[in-house]
């Protein structure tokens, strides 16, 4: 007969500490929405370089209501996003926050990260239901803030690293791109990575593909605006079905773990690569063990994995559900199962791991 364990004694100090931590978590959750608000209303941009401003002055500059702006500024000051001077009643955006919240060219640019998080939270009731059933939710089923926020989050990292360090870390790839290479950018989303490579290597040609028609429509428009539509084409197709062959380079940016059948995608890469071609795989930074990822970056990625990545994979055939924190060992297994024999970590950042795979 089973016996009941005595209830564990509660440490009052530890309980109080946890409660106050939870209060901070609620504040952070609400702040994410307020950061998105500040970004969309231009509040941060109006504060940038403007010196100390009153709520009324900021409201006038942004054509917003001063009463709302005052409350928003108080929240931002409480969280350390802006500085408050009680002697003057004015608020200032420090230069570090200016870079992170207004400079889209900065690798530290954060509004897209918050927008992606808010979009994920907005969709969380739907995810809660599929957790019961084990069904999936496709990328195309998410709100616009997820699609736009994802591109805005990843683009600064690509701009900072793709041309300067990631591609040069691959064996002989830059030389091929400079001479004129054939490139497939799979799971390209809005085309940020595709267009960046096309602008940098004008003698190469690029095919971007994604199963989400709305993202491809945006990518085509962006290519026209960037003046690279003559050497970039985009197609709506799943990763295991993109067109073409004899590619010198196939790229996948932060998408392999989202696929229902990543090994099937790997097999298609093997079939479409040139004999001396290269597959570059960019994945979220992760260790192979859970305990390796119990840190702020891992926490954010496990959150996105629960709300976005795992549901996306489970909505597709096979539904392997690698998750955003798959780690190098599982990515290696997918690659070798797909028939590519050479695999190595070529580069990394605090947010990404970059792998090189070859036949």
Image (cartoon, rainbow, N blue to C red):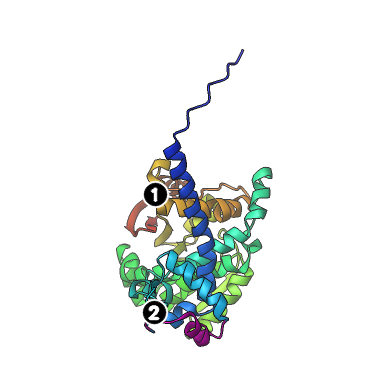
The residue lying at 37 percent from left, 82 percent from top is: 51
Most extreme residue toward the front is 87
Q: Is residue 119 left or right of residue 18?
A: right
Magenta residues (range): 51-64
Which residue occupies the foreground of this view, 172 or 54?
Answer: 54
Q: Position of residue 324 (x, y in %)?
A: 48, 52
Instruction: Give the structural element (helix, strand or loop) at label 1.
Output: loop
Q: Quadrant of the C terminus?
A: bottom left
* Residue found at the far top of this picture: 1
Q: Nearer the viewer, residue 218 or 114?
A: 114
Tag nearer the camera, 1 or 2: 2
Give the residue pinned by disc 2: 88
Query: In the figure, is residue 126 to the left or right of 96?
Result: right
Q: Is residue 47 above or below residue 256?
A: below
Q: Is residue 269 above or below residue 87?
A: above
Identify the residue at horizontal 41%, vertical 68% (top origin).
Answer: 81
State whether residue 333 is above or below residue 257. Answer: above
Among the two numbered marks 1 and 2 on one chain, the one whose residue lies closer to the N terminus: 2
Q: Residue at x 47, y 60 (%)?
A: 254
Q: CA distance from mark 1 to mark 2?
A: 39 Å
Residue 172 screen position, x and y as percent: 31, 66
Across and down, in percent, residue 307 comes to 57, 54
Residue with the mark numbered 1: 295
Q: Which structural element holds mark 2? A: loop
- Residue 270 visible somewhere in the drawing: yes
The quadrant in which the N terminus is found is: top right
Residue name at image x 40 percent, y 54 percent: 285
Q: How many marks?
A: 2
Q: Residues within 10 Å of mark 1 (few under 14, many from 20)?
A: few
Find out whether residue 265 is within the magenta segment.
no
Q: Nearer the viewer, residue 227 or 70?
A: 70
């Amino acid at each position: 007969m089973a016996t009941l364990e005595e209830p564990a004694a509660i440490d009052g100090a530890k309980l109080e500490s946890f409660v106050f931590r939870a209060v901070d978590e609620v504040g952070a959750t609400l702040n994410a929405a307020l950061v998105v608000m500040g970004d969309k209303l231009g509040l941060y941009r109006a504060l940038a370089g403007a010196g100390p401003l009153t709520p009324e002055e900021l409201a006038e500059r942004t054509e917003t209501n001063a009463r709302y702006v005052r409350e928003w500024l108080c929240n931002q000051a409480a969280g350390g996003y802006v500085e408050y001077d009680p002697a003057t009643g004015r608020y200032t955006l420090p230069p570090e926050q200016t870079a992170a919240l207004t400079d889209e060219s900065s690798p530290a640019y954060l509004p897209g990260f918050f927008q992606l998080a808010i979009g994920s939270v907005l969709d969380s009731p739907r995810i809660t239901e599929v957790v019961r059933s084990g069904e999936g939710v496709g990328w195309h089923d998410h709100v616009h803030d997820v699609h736009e926020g994802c591109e805005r989050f990843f683009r600064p990292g690509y701009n900072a690293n793709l041309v300067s360090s990631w591609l040069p870390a691959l064996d002989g790839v830059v030389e091929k791109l400079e001479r004129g290479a054939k490139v497939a950018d799979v799971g390209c989303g809005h085309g940020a990575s595709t267009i960046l490579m096309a602008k940098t290597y004008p003698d190469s040609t690029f095919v971007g593909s994604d199963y989400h028609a709305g993202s491809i429509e945006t990518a085509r428009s962006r290519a026209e605006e960037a003046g690279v539509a003559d050497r970039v084409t985009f197609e709506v197709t799943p990763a295991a079905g993109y067109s073409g062959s004899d590619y010198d380079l196939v790229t996948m940016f932060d998408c392999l773990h989202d696929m229902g059948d990543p090994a099937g995608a790997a097999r298609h890469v093997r079939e479409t690569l040139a004999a001396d071609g290269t597959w570059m795989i960019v994945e979220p930074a992760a260790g192979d063990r859970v305990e390796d990822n119990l840190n702020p970056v891992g926490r954010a990625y496990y959150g996105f994995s629960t709300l976005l990545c795992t549901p996306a994979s489970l909505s597709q055939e096979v539904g392997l559900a690698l998750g955003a924190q798959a780690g190098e060992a599982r990515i290696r297994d997918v690659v070798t199962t797909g028939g590519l024999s050479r695999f190595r970590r070529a580069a990394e950042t605090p947010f990404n791991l970059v792998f090189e795979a070859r036949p």
